[in-house]
Image (spheres, helix red, strand yellow):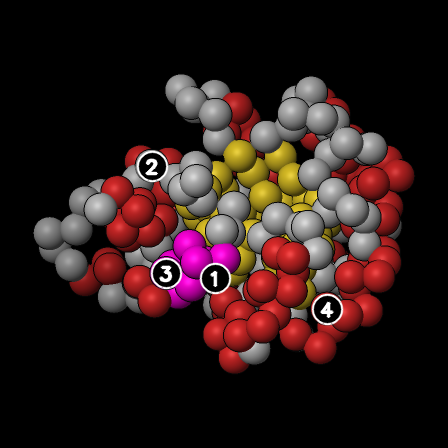
Amino acid sequence: MRPQVVAHRGASEDNAEHTLRAYVAALDAGADGLECDVRLTADGHLVCVHDRDLRRTASRPGVISTMELADLDQLDFASWKHPWADLDDEAPERDEELDTVLTLRKLLETAADYDRRIEVAIETKHPTRYGGLVERRVVEMLRDFGWAGLGSPARVMSFSYTALQRVERLAPGLPVVMLVERAHHWPMLRRVIGEDWIVGPGIVELQEHPKLGRRIVDSGHDLHVWTVNTQDELDLCLELGVKAVISDRPAYMRELLDR
C-alpha cells in the first residue's frame, strides 16, 4: 500500500515554511496531508511556528510565547527564504497575506475546505512555558471541527511522551504519533507507549541504525517517517511498509510514487 505524502511545514523546500503559501503549494502538488508545529502566543492563540523565537523566520528578536497574535501578524515570515526576490523584475506580484504568521485555525479551515480529504499532523513543541495548555488548546480546536475522535483527519505528534498522554486523556481515539529522535530511546519507549500509537522516527536514525525500523514494525506499530526528501530515503520507507512520509518536497515524492 502506497504511503501518504505529508508536506513538512508545507512545501517547504521551495516556500517559506509554515506560511499559507507553502501549504497551498503542497495541496496543489497533491499532498495527502499537511504537517505543522504549533506554539501558543501570549494571548492564547495557536500559531504554526517551529522555533521558539523569531530570529530565523522573521529576522528579528522576539519569543513567540511572549508576543500577541496582532504583533506577530505585522511581521514578514517569508522574506528570509528568498531574500533577493524583490530584485527579480519577472517575479509575480506577491500576495503578502500568504506570507504572514499562520494560525492553526486557518490551516485547519484550509484543509477542511479542500475538495478532497486532507490529513493534518500537528506537532506540539516542548519544553514550553505553557506546558499542558498547548495540548488542551489543540484538542479544543479539533473539537470545534469535529475532529477530536475516531476517524479524525487530524493527529497529534510530539517528542514528549507526557504530552501525548495528555492528548490521549483529553481525546480518546484521536491518533497520536510518538516521535523518536534517537534510536537508543526506542527500547524504553516501546515499553510505555500505547498499543495503537503511531511511531515517528527520523529518516537519519533509520539509515544509521538499520535494525530500528524493522524492530518498530515487528512491535506492531505503524511508522510515519520524517523528513524524507530523496529517492533512497523513500525506497527505505517503502521497504519498511511506512504508512506516511513527511517531506519538504511533496511534489517530488508524489512523482516518485506515481512512477
Q: Is residue 34 visible?
A: yes
Q: Residue at x 58, y 53 (%)?
A: 223
Query: What is the distance, in whole Å, between disc 2 and disc 3 at their CAs?
Result: 20 Å
Secondary element type, mark 3: helix
Q: Secondary structure under badge 2?
A: loop
Q: Which residues are the magenta region?
A: 233-240
Helix, strand or loop for disc 1: loop
Packing grade of label 3 (10 A; few <14, some 14-19, many >=20) is some
| Left or right of residue 224, residue 173 in this image | right
Q: Are marks 4 and 2 in contact (CB under 8 Å)?
A: no
Callout 4: 10 Å neighbours few (<14), some, many (20+)?
Answer: some
The amino acid sitting under disc 3 is Asp
Nearer mark to the viewer, of 2 and 3: 3
Residue under pointer 4: 186
Is residue 152 magenta-colored? no
- Using the rendered view, name the quadrant where residue 97 is placed: top left
Image coords of residue 173 (percent x, y): 77, 31
Instruction: Tell me how far mark 1 sits from mark 2, CA to CA.
Output: 18 Å
Furthest toward the front, the residue is 218
Quadrant (top left/top right/bottom left/bottom right) for the N terminus: top left
Front-lying residue, 24 or 73? 24
- Residue at image mark 2: 30
Q: Which residue is mark 1?
A: 227
Q: CA distance from mark 1 to mark 4?
A: 18 Å
Q: Position of residue 255 (x, y in %)?
A: 25, 47
Give the image quarter of residue 93: top left
- Sequence order check: which comes first, mark 2 or mark 3? 2
The amino acid on which the numbered mark 2 sits, given as a three-letter code, is Gly
> Which sits earlier in the primary sequence, circle 4 or circle 2?
2
Number of dots carrying numbers: 4
Q: Earlier in the sequence, mark 3 or mark 4?
A: 4
